[in-house]
Structures are given as structure tokens and as C-alpha cells.
Amino acid sequence: MKYAVYSKEPLKEEIMIKLKGKLDYQNPDFVFSFGGDGTMLNAVNQYIDNTDKTIFIGINTGKLGFYTDYALEELDSIIDSINKGEVFCHEFSLLEYSLIKNNQVKKGYALNEVAITNPIHTQIIEVYINEKMFETFRGTGLLVSTPSGSTGYNKSLGGSVMDCSLEAIQLTEIAAINNRIFKSLASPLIIPSNNKVSMISHDSDNIYISVDGRYEEFRDVEKIEVMFSNKKVKMLGSKNYSFYNRVKKSFIE
């Protein structure tokens, strides 16, 4: 077993001893993420180019664990299952985004969401769906999320929770200005996976773009394009553990 370990805090020696195999931080078969959802998002970002051959394992040592199915005391049984080849994975869809400025294009992927915000200056953002004008948004910003990411920042904005088996993305407004002069949809919008969302800001000097909570260093962006990606992230989990179990565990129980 080739594996890598991702954790914000140094792991105790007895935990590292249990992880029998070869440490390989370049091309791991398994990435053990110790922490909460934020740690898992960073782990996926670290190995985003390896998602076709890497399985992520979330060990919840934090508070909220939508992506972390296991407790620390289950580590022995996880390793035993891996050694026996008894591995089942849940797959989570990604967003593919492009930040465009002149002839420069920065591409990347997001497991949860892409956010375009500014809490100080009102944003004026033209929204296009498949290159056709949809609306001119005014407010704090816009959020595009995956089905699994719909349970994160999107949910706190009043967005819909989407089943992870759906192939769609969600566009959600952040503090929209709506009056008799300025109007926007004022509702989350579910968009099929074969559609592309494009956003053009009227004040590109004053927008902040974050991907899964990480700030993107890309100033004076002219256009942001976001679409559903065919690329997926595989996470070790129980065959009987459904999306609704995850939602219930994270928000109801």
C-alpha cells in the first residue's frame, strides 16, 4: 500500500505505526486525511492531479465531517479492509473553472464551490449561461457549487441541498440587491451538467475569488467560467452509507 498522510496537526507516533505500507507523497494509492472537512478539501486540492488513481480516506478528528466517514478508533479496521481488498468508494463530482484575463487563463477544480465576493464594494456581475445573457447581478457576490458542496457555504446562504448522485451545479446569490430598479433572480438556480456559467465583473479590481475556501491569487480577472467536470474524487466509505445518512449525520442528529 502506497499512502500519504494529510493533517493540520502532527500525528501521534502510535497512529503512524498503524499505517503500514510505503509513504509516498508523490503518487499515493491512498491519502489519509485526519481532521474535518476543511482538511479533506485541502488534501483533495493537494492531489487534484491524481484523482483518477487515488482514494481519499477521511478520519474525523475535527467537528463537522461531511466528507469524513470514519472515527479514529476505526483506523485498524480500515487498514485491514484495504489489505483484504475490500474497498468501496463513494464518488464526488468536481467543478472545473477558468479565470480569464487578456490572453492568460488559469484553470482549476473545486470539490465544494467557487465564490466571487466582495463584502465592502457592491458587485455588478453579468451572468451568462451557455454564452447567453441571463441577468445582471448586484450584491455581495455569487457562488457556484457542486452537489456535495451544496451542503457547505451554499446551504448557509439558503441554497438547496442537492443529492450527490445528480449531475448538476448550483448558482446561489450572496446578499443580492433587489428593488424596483435593480432585479435579479433572488433564488438558487440548479443548472444541468452540460451547461456553462460565465460571470463578468464590472469592477474586476475589487473582486475576491475563492475556491473551496482558498483565496485565488489572480487579479484583474475579466471573466470567470464554471462548469461541471467529468473528473471525480473517490473516497473510501461504507457501501450502505447513503447521501441522506451524510446529511442527517451532519445537520440533524
Image (cartoon, rainbow, N blue to C red):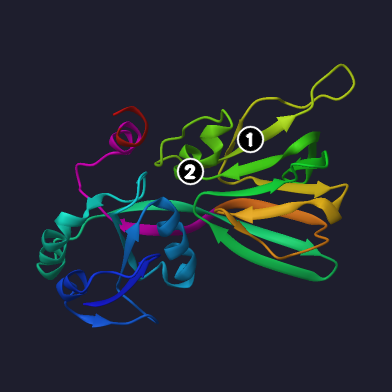
Relative to residue 184, is residue 198 depicted above or below? Answer: below
The mark nearer the N terminus, 1 or 2, is 2
Is 18 or 151 nearer to us in this picture?
18
Q: Amino acid at mark 2?
A: Glu
What's the magenta region? 229-248
- Label 1 sits on a secondary structure element that is strand
- Label 2 sits on a secondary structure element that is loop
Looking at the image, which residue is at 37% across and 80% down? 25
Question: In the rendered view, does 250 fall on the left or right side of 113?
Answer: left
Location of the C terminus by quadrant is top left
Is 104 or 33 nearer to us in this picture?
33
Residue 55: percent from left, percent from top: 32, 65
Q: What residue did someone put label 2 on?
A: 167
Closer to the eye: label 1 or 2: 1
Q: Is residue 236 magenta?
A: yes
Q: Amino acid at mark 1?
A: Thr
Can residue 208 be seen in the rendering of this structure? yes
Residue 134: percent from left, percent from top: 77, 35
Can residue 135 be seen in the rendering of this structure? no
Q: Can you tell which quarter of the image residue 223 is in? A: bottom right
Q: Is residue 250 magenta?
A: no
Is 191 or 75 nearer to us in this picture?
75
Location of the N terminus by quadrant is bottom left
Relative to residue 252, is residue 151 depicted above or below? Answer: below
